[in-house]
Amino acid sequence: MTADRTTAPRTSARRRLIAGAALLPLLALAACGYGSEKKDDTTNAAASSGTSKKLSASTVKIGYFANLTHATPLVGLKEGFFADELGSGTTIKESVFNAGPAEIEALNAGSIDIGWIGPSPSINGWTKSGGESLKIISGSASGGVKLVVNPDKIKTLKDVKGKKIATPQLGNTQDVAFLNWIAEQGWKVDATSGKGDVSVVRTDNKVTPDAYKTGSIDGAWVPEPTASKLVAEGAKVLLDERDLWPDKKFVITNVIVSQKFLKEHPDVVEAVLRGSVKTNAWINANPDKAKADANAQLEKLSGKPLPADVIDPAWQSIQVIDDPLASTLQTEADHAVTAGLLEKPSLGGIYDLTILNKILTSEGKTKIDDAGLGG
Protein backbone atom coordinates (compact mmCIF):
# COMPACT_ATOMS: atom_id res chain seq x y z
CA MET A 1 0.00 0.00 0.00
CA THR A 2 1.05 3.58 -0.57
CA ALA A 3 2.54 5.31 2.45
CA ASP A 4 0.46 7.91 4.24
CA ARG A 5 1.79 8.60 7.74
CA THR A 6 4.07 6.36 9.77
CA THR A 7 4.70 5.67 13.41
CA ALA A 8 6.74 2.98 15.07
CA PRO A 9 5.19 -0.47 14.98
CA ARG A 10 3.82 -1.79 18.23
CA THR A 11 3.01 -5.16 19.66
CA SER A 12 -0.41 -6.18 20.81
CA ALA A 13 -2.15 -9.35 21.84
CA ARG A 14 -4.68 -11.13 19.71
CA ARG A 15 -8.31 -11.52 20.39
CA ARG A 16 -10.78 -14.10 19.21
CA LEU A 17 -14.15 -13.54 17.62
CA ILE A 18 -17.47 -15.00 18.70
CA ALA A 19 -19.58 -15.28 15.59
CA GLY A 20 -23.28 -14.78 15.21
CA ALA A 21 -25.52 -13.69 12.39
CA ALA A 22 -28.35 -11.32 11.64
CA LEU A 23 -30.05 -9.80 8.64
CA LEU A 24 -30.97 -6.21 8.00
CA PRO A 25 -33.25 -5.00 5.18
CA LEU A 26 -31.87 -2.75 2.49
CA LEU A 27 -32.83 0.89 2.08
CA ALA A 28 -34.71 1.71 -1.09
CA LEU A 29 -31.94 3.62 -2.83
CA ALA A 30 -28.46 3.09 -2.19
CA ALA A 31 -25.00 3.29 -1.85
CA CYS A 32 -22.15 0.86 -1.42
CA GLY A 33 -23.66 -2.46 -2.40
CA TYR A 34 -22.23 -5.83 -1.59
CA GLY A 35 -25.42 -7.71 -0.60
CA SER A 36 -27.40 -7.58 2.61
CA GLU A 37 -25.77 -10.15 4.88
CA LYS A 38 -24.53 -8.96 8.28
CA LYS A 39 -22.51 -10.89 10.82
CA ASP A 40 -22.05 -9.90 14.46
CA ASP A 41 -18.94 -10.60 16.53
CA THR A 42 -18.04 -9.52 20.02
CA THR A 43 -14.59 -8.71 21.32
CA ASN A 44 -13.72 -7.95 24.92
CA ALA A 45 -11.23 -5.11 24.90
CA ALA A 46 -10.05 -6.10 28.36
CA ALA A 47 -8.72 -9.39 27.07
CA SER A 48 -6.60 -7.65 24.45
CA SER A 49 -5.39 -4.49 26.09
CA GLY A 50 -4.62 -5.49 29.64
CA THR A 51 -5.18 -1.88 30.68
CA SER A 52 -7.50 -0.53 33.34
CA LYS A 53 -8.72 2.44 31.31
CA LYS A 54 -12.42 3.15 31.90
CA LEU A 55 -14.41 5.03 29.31
CA SER A 56 -18.01 6.27 29.31
CA ALA A 57 -19.49 3.30 27.39
CA SER A 58 -19.15 -0.36 28.29
CA THR A 59 -19.69 -1.37 24.65
CA VAL A 60 -18.93 0.19 21.28
CA LYS A 61 -20.62 -1.32 18.23
CA ILE A 62 -18.49 -1.18 15.10
CA GLY A 63 -19.56 -1.95 11.51
CA TYR A 64 -17.46 -2.65 8.44
CA PHE A 65 -17.29 -4.76 5.26
CA ALA A 66 -15.31 -7.91 4.54
CA ASN A 67 -13.53 -5.98 1.82
CA LEU A 68 -9.92 -4.87 1.25
CA THR A 69 -11.03 -1.23 1.04
CA HIS A 70 -11.92 -1.73 4.72
CA ALA A 71 -8.37 -2.75 5.60
CA THR A 72 -8.32 -0.49 8.66
CA PRO A 73 -10.93 -2.40 10.68
CA LEU A 74 -9.77 -5.77 9.33
CA VAL A 75 -6.19 -5.19 10.44
CA GLY A 76 -6.85 -3.00 13.47
CA LEU A 77 -9.21 -5.50 15.06
CA LYS A 78 -6.88 -8.43 14.41
CA GLU A 79 -3.82 -6.61 15.75
CA GLY A 80 -5.71 -5.24 18.75
CA PHE A 81 -5.16 -1.52 18.09
CA PHE A 82 -8.77 -0.62 18.90
CA ALA A 83 -8.89 -2.81 22.00
CA ASP A 84 -5.66 -1.26 23.28
CA GLU A 85 -7.09 2.25 22.98
CA LEU A 86 -10.48 1.37 24.48
CA GLY A 87 -9.03 -0.30 27.54
CA SER A 88 -10.38 -2.99 29.80
CA GLY A 89 -13.80 -1.51 30.43
CA THR A 90 -15.15 -1.36 26.86
CA THR A 91 -16.27 -4.33 24.79
CA ILE A 92 -16.14 -4.16 21.00
CA LYS A 93 -19.16 -5.58 19.19
CA GLU A 94 -18.49 -6.10 15.50
CA SER A 95 -21.06 -6.22 12.72
CA VAL A 96 -19.79 -7.25 9.28
CA PHE A 97 -21.90 -6.04 6.36
CA ASN A 98 -21.97 -6.67 2.64
CA ALA A 99 -24.08 -3.58 1.90
CA GLY A 100 -23.91 0.14 2.59
CA PRO A 101 -27.70 0.45 2.90
CA ALA A 102 -27.81 -2.18 5.63
CA GLU A 103 -25.01 -0.48 7.55
CA ILE A 104 -26.74 2.90 7.39
CA GLU A 105 -29.96 1.34 8.62
CA ALA A 106 -28.04 -0.31 11.45
CA LEU A 107 -26.54 3.06 12.41
CA ASN A 108 -29.95 4.70 12.36
CA ALA A 109 -31.40 1.89 14.48
CA GLY A 110 -28.59 2.05 17.04
CA SER A 111 -27.32 -1.41 16.09
CA ILE A 112 -23.90 0.10 15.39
CA ASP A 113 -22.28 3.27 16.71
CA ILE A 114 -19.33 3.69 14.37
CA GLY A 115 -18.83 2.32 10.87
CA TRP A 116 -16.46 2.12 7.95
CA ILE A 117 -18.44 2.81 4.80
CA GLY A 118 -18.26 4.28 1.30
CA PRO A 119 -19.00 7.88 0.27
CA SER A 120 -22.35 7.27 -1.44
CA PRO A 121 -24.03 5.68 1.60
CA SER A 122 -22.54 8.42 3.77
CA ILE A 123 -24.12 11.05 1.54
CA ASN A 124 -27.38 9.11 1.35
CA GLY A 125 -27.61 8.63 5.10
CA TRP A 126 -26.90 12.29 5.73
CA THR A 127 -29.40 13.48 3.13
CA LYS A 128 -32.25 11.14 4.05
CA SER A 129 -32.00 12.11 7.73
CA GLY A 130 -31.84 15.83 7.04
CA GLY A 131 -28.33 15.93 8.46
CA GLU A 132 -29.38 14.34 11.77
CA SER A 133 -28.10 10.75 11.66
CA LEU A 134 -24.35 10.71 11.16
CA LYS A 135 -21.08 12.56 10.93
CA ILE A 136 -18.02 11.65 8.90
CA ILE A 137 -15.16 11.75 11.40
CA SER A 138 -12.21 10.39 9.42
CA GLY A 139 -11.03 8.93 6.18
CA SER A 140 -9.81 5.38 5.82
CA ALA A 141 -8.98 4.50 2.22
CA SER A 142 -8.54 5.90 -1.27
CA GLY A 143 -8.53 4.13 -4.62
CA GLY A 144 -9.12 0.44 -5.21
CA VAL A 145 -11.66 0.74 -8.06
CA LYS A 146 -11.12 -0.37 -11.67
CA LEU A 147 -12.91 -0.91 -14.96
CA VAL A 148 -11.95 -4.43 -16.01
CA VAL A 149 -13.12 -5.94 -19.30
CA ASN A 150 -13.04 -8.97 -21.56
CA PRO A 151 -10.07 -8.20 -23.83
CA ASP A 152 -11.57 -10.22 -26.68
CA LYS A 153 -14.60 -7.92 -26.80
CA ILE A 154 -13.24 -4.59 -25.54
CA LYS A 155 -9.82 -3.32 -26.55
CA THR A 156 -10.24 0.45 -26.14
CA LEU A 157 -12.40 2.76 -24.03
CA LYS A 158 -14.55 3.47 -27.11
CA ASP A 159 -15.37 -0.24 -27.32
CA VAL A 160 -17.30 -0.03 -24.03
CA LYS A 161 -20.23 1.44 -25.96
CA GLY A 162 -22.82 -1.24 -26.65
CA LYS A 163 -21.39 -3.64 -24.07
CA LYS A 164 -22.73 -5.07 -20.79
CA ILE A 165 -20.80 -3.69 -17.82
CA ALA A 166 -21.53 -4.64 -14.22
CA THR A 167 -21.59 -2.35 -11.20
CA PRO A 168 -22.31 -3.54 -7.64
CA GLN A 169 -25.68 -1.86 -7.06
CA LEU A 170 -27.99 0.86 -8.33
CA GLY A 171 -26.76 4.15 -6.92
CA ASN A 172 -23.72 2.70 -5.17
CA THR A 173 -20.37 4.47 -5.25
CA GLN A 174 -19.04 2.59 -8.27
CA ASP A 175 -22.38 2.78 -10.10
CA VAL A 176 -22.39 6.56 -9.76
CA ALA A 177 -18.78 6.81 -10.93
CA PHE A 178 -19.48 4.66 -14.00
CA LEU A 179 -22.64 6.57 -14.92
CA ASN A 180 -20.70 9.81 -14.68
CA TRP A 181 -17.90 8.42 -16.87
CA ILE A 182 -20.49 7.28 -19.44
CA ALA A 183 -21.96 10.80 -19.54
CA GLU A 184 -18.49 12.26 -20.06
CA GLN A 185 -18.11 10.08 -23.17
CA GLY A 186 -21.28 11.67 -24.57
CA TRP A 187 -23.26 8.43 -24.27
CA LYS A 188 -26.79 8.14 -22.88
CA VAL A 189 -28.00 5.64 -20.27
CA ASP A 190 -31.19 5.64 -18.23
CA ALA A 191 -29.79 5.60 -14.69
CA THR A 192 -32.63 3.61 -13.16
CA SER A 193 -32.95 0.82 -15.73
CA GLY A 194 -29.30 0.83 -16.82
CA LYS A 195 -30.39 0.69 -20.47
CA GLY A 196 -28.87 2.83 -23.19
CA ASP A 197 -25.63 3.18 -25.12
CA VAL A 198 -24.06 0.95 -22.48
CA SER A 199 -25.97 -1.74 -20.58
CA VAL A 200 -25.25 -1.16 -16.89
CA VAL A 201 -25.88 -4.48 -15.15
CA ARG A 202 -26.25 -4.21 -11.37
CA THR A 203 -24.64 -7.38 -10.04
CA ASP A 204 -23.62 -8.32 -6.51
CA ASN A 205 -19.83 -8.44 -6.24
CA LYS A 206 -20.02 -11.99 -4.93
CA VAL A 207 -21.46 -13.26 -8.22
CA THR A 208 -19.75 -10.88 -10.67
CA PRO A 209 -16.83 -13.25 -11.36
CA ASP A 210 -19.25 -16.04 -12.28
CA ALA A 211 -21.25 -13.64 -14.46
CA TYR A 212 -18.03 -12.76 -16.25
CA LYS A 213 -17.06 -16.42 -16.75
CA THR A 214 -20.45 -17.24 -18.27
CA GLY A 215 -20.31 -14.24 -20.61
CA SER A 216 -23.41 -12.54 -19.23
CA ILE A 217 -21.31 -9.40 -18.69
CA ASP A 218 -18.44 -8.02 -20.75
CA GLY A 219 -16.72 -6.24 -17.89
CA ALA A 220 -17.26 -4.46 -14.59
CA TRP A 221 -16.56 -1.18 -12.78
CA VAL A 222 -15.88 -2.61 -9.34
CA PRO A 223 -13.87 -2.27 -6.14
CA GLU A 224 -11.11 -4.56 -4.94
CA PRO A 225 -10.75 -7.44 -4.61
CA THR A 226 -13.51 -8.08 -7.20
CA ALA A 227 -11.52 -6.31 -9.92
CA SER A 228 -8.48 -8.51 -9.35
CA LYS A 229 -10.66 -11.62 -9.17
CA LEU A 230 -11.86 -10.81 -12.69
CA VAL A 231 -8.30 -10.25 -13.86
CA ALA A 232 -7.43 -13.70 -12.51
CA GLU A 233 -10.23 -15.02 -14.76
CA GLY A 234 -8.63 -13.42 -17.83
CA ALA A 235 -10.06 -9.89 -17.76
CA LYS A 236 -7.84 -6.86 -18.35
CA VAL A 237 -7.75 -3.53 -16.51
CA LEU A 238 -8.99 -0.93 -18.98
CA LEU A 239 -9.16 1.99 -16.55
CA ASP A 240 -8.05 2.62 -12.98
CA GLU A 241 -10.41 5.16 -11.41
CA ARG A 242 -7.46 6.81 -9.68
CA ASP A 243 -6.46 8.21 -13.07
CA LEU A 244 -9.67 10.26 -13.21
CA TRP A 245 -8.95 12.19 -9.99
CA PRO A 246 -6.53 14.98 -9.06
CA ASP A 247 -3.41 13.54 -7.42
CA LYS A 248 -4.91 10.08 -8.11
CA LYS A 249 -6.85 10.27 -4.84
CA PHE A 250 -10.56 9.88 -4.12
CA VAL A 251 -12.41 8.69 -1.07
CA ILE A 252 -13.54 5.07 -1.16
CA THR A 253 -13.98 4.47 2.59
CA ASN A 254 -14.96 6.90 5.39
CA VAL A 255 -15.43 6.47 9.12
CA ILE A 256 -18.90 7.57 10.26
CA VAL A 257 -20.45 7.82 13.70
CA SER A 258 -23.96 8.20 15.05
CA GLN A 259 -24.42 11.80 16.14
CA LYS A 260 -26.12 10.56 19.30
CA PHE A 261 -23.15 8.35 20.19
CA LEU A 262 -20.69 11.12 19.37
CA LYS A 263 -22.49 13.50 21.70
CA GLU A 264 -22.83 11.00 24.54
CA HIS A 265 -19.48 9.21 24.27
CA PRO A 266 -16.82 11.43 22.69
CA ASP A 267 -14.10 9.68 24.71
CA VAL A 268 -15.02 6.34 23.15
CA VAL A 269 -15.08 7.87 19.68
CA GLU A 270 -11.63 9.33 20.35
CA ALA A 271 -10.32 5.93 21.44
CA VAL A 272 -11.63 4.28 18.27
CA LEU A 273 -10.14 7.02 16.10
CA ARG A 274 -6.80 6.70 17.88
CA GLY A 275 -6.95 3.02 17.04
CA SER A 276 -7.74 3.88 13.43
CA VAL A 277 -4.86 6.34 13.09
CA LYS A 278 -2.42 3.88 14.69
CA THR A 279 -3.69 1.06 12.48
CA ASN A 280 -3.25 3.11 9.32
CA ALA A 281 0.29 4.08 10.30
CA TRP A 282 1.12 0.45 11.09
CA ILE A 283 -0.34 -0.79 7.80
CA ASN A 284 1.78 1.68 5.85
CA ALA A 285 4.89 0.77 7.86
CA ASN A 286 4.24 -2.98 7.60
CA PRO A 287 2.41 -3.54 4.30
CA ASP A 288 3.23 -7.23 3.88
CA LYS A 289 2.23 -8.19 7.41
CA ALA A 290 -0.89 -6.02 7.14
CA LYS A 291 -1.84 -7.71 3.86
CA ALA A 292 -1.49 -11.10 5.52
CA ASP A 293 -3.62 -9.91 8.46
CA ALA A 294 -6.33 -8.62 6.15
CA ASN A 295 -6.37 -11.87 4.21
CA ALA A 296 -6.55 -13.91 7.42
CA GLN A 297 -9.57 -11.87 8.49
CA LEU A 298 -11.22 -12.35 5.10
CA GLU A 299 -10.64 -16.09 5.41
CA LYS A 300 -12.25 -16.06 8.85
CA LEU A 301 -15.25 -14.12 7.56
CA SER A 302 -15.73 -15.78 4.16
CA GLY A 303 -14.25 -19.24 4.66
CA LYS A 304 -11.28 -18.90 2.32
CA PRO A 305 -8.37 -16.51 1.76
CA LEU A 306 -7.68 -14.63 -1.43
CA PRO A 307 -5.00 -16.21 -3.64
CA ALA A 308 -1.80 -14.27 -4.25
CA ASP A 309 -2.72 -13.36 -7.84
CA VAL A 310 -5.79 -11.57 -6.46
CA ILE A 311 -4.71 -10.01 -3.18
CA ASP A 312 -1.30 -8.74 -4.36
CA PRO A 313 -2.54 -6.39 -7.14
CA ALA A 314 -5.65 -5.48 -5.16
CA TRP A 315 -3.61 -4.46 -2.13
CA GLN A 316 -1.29 -2.31 -4.22
CA SER A 317 -4.17 -0.27 -5.61
CA ILE A 318 -5.55 0.83 -2.23
CA GLN A 319 -4.11 3.65 -0.16
CA VAL A 320 -4.83 3.62 3.55
CA ILE A 321 -5.21 7.23 4.68
CA ASP A 322 -6.60 9.30 7.57
CA ASP A 323 -7.67 12.17 5.32
CA PRO A 324 -11.34 11.78 4.22
CA LEU A 325 -10.53 13.76 1.04
CA ALA A 326 -13.55 15.97 1.64
CA SER A 327 -13.43 17.79 -1.68
CA THR A 328 -13.85 14.49 -3.53
CA LEU A 329 -17.00 13.71 -1.51
CA GLN A 330 -18.65 16.84 -2.91
CA THR A 331 -17.58 15.82 -6.39
CA GLU A 332 -19.05 12.34 -5.94
CA ALA A 333 -22.31 13.90 -4.75
CA ASP A 334 -22.33 16.09 -7.85
CA HIS A 335 -21.86 13.00 -10.00
CA ALA A 336 -24.92 11.37 -8.40
CA VAL A 337 -26.95 14.50 -9.12
CA THR A 338 -25.81 14.50 -12.75
CA ALA A 339 -26.79 10.85 -13.06
CA GLY A 340 -30.28 11.66 -11.81
CA LEU A 341 -29.92 9.47 -8.73
CA LEU A 342 -29.88 12.23 -6.14
CA GLU A 343 -31.34 15.70 -5.73
CA LYS A 344 -28.62 18.24 -5.07
CA PRO A 345 -27.74 17.74 -1.41
CA SER A 346 -26.53 20.24 1.13
CA LEU A 347 -23.45 18.63 2.64
CA GLY A 348 -22.54 21.49 4.97
CA GLY A 349 -21.94 19.96 8.39
CA ILE A 350 -21.47 16.37 7.24
CA TYR A 351 -17.91 16.34 8.59
CA ASP A 352 -16.72 16.69 12.17
CA LEU A 353 -12.96 16.26 12.12
CA THR A 354 -12.44 17.82 15.56
CA ILE A 355 -11.38 14.62 17.30
CA LEU A 356 -9.29 13.40 14.38
CA ASN A 357 -7.39 16.67 14.24
CA LYS A 358 -6.88 16.58 18.01
CA ILE A 359 -5.25 13.18 17.62
CA LEU A 360 -3.13 14.20 14.65
CA THR A 361 -1.84 17.39 16.27
CA SER A 362 -1.02 15.50 19.46
CA GLU A 363 1.26 13.34 17.30
CA GLY A 364 2.83 16.34 15.58
CA LYS A 365 0.93 15.82 12.33
CA THR A 366 -0.86 18.33 10.14
CA LYS A 367 -4.56 19.02 10.62
CA ILE A 368 -6.89 17.80 7.91
CA ASP A 369 -9.23 20.14 6.02
CA ASP A 370 -12.98 19.48 5.69
CA ALA A 371 -13.32 21.48 2.44
CA GLY A 372 -15.82 23.80 4.10
CA LEU A 373 -18.21 20.93 4.86
CA GLY A 374 -17.66 20.80 8.62
CA GLY A 375 -19.97 21.97 11.36
Image: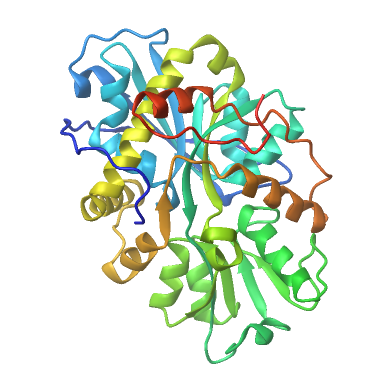
Work out whether 13 lies above or below 141.
above
Work out whether 156 lies above or below 282.
below
Quadrant in which the N terminus appears: bottom left
Seen at 23% across and 17% down, the residue is: 46
Q: In this orientation, which residue lies closer to the viewer: 11 or 324?
A: 324
Is residue 139 rendered to the left or right of residue 75?
A: right
Give the x, y percent position of residue 78: 26, 38
Q: In this orientation, which residue lies closer to the viewer: 352 or 51?
A: 352
The extreme bottom residue here reads 152
- What number of labels is visible? 0
Give the x, y percent position of residue 90: 34, 15
Give the x, y percent position of residue 230: 45, 73
Q: In which image quadrant can residue 26 be found? A: top right
Seen at 27% across and 10% down, the residue is: 53
Is residue 72 rendered to the left or right of residue 295?
A: right
Q: In this orientation, which residue lies closer to the viewer: 213 or 70?
A: 70
Give the x, y percent position of residue 154: 59, 87
Q: Residue 116: in sight, yes or no? A: yes
Seen at 63% across and 53% down, the residue is: 173
Quadrant in which the C terminus appears: top right
Q: Residue 273: in sight, yes or no? A: no
Q: In which image quadrant can residue 190 be found? A: bottom right
Is residue 369 rendered to the left or right of residue 49?
A: right
Seen at 81% across and 76% down, the residue is: 186
Identify the colour scheme used: rainbow
Work out whether 212 lies above or below 333.
below
Q: In this orientation, which residue lies closer to the viewer: 235 or 344?
A: 344
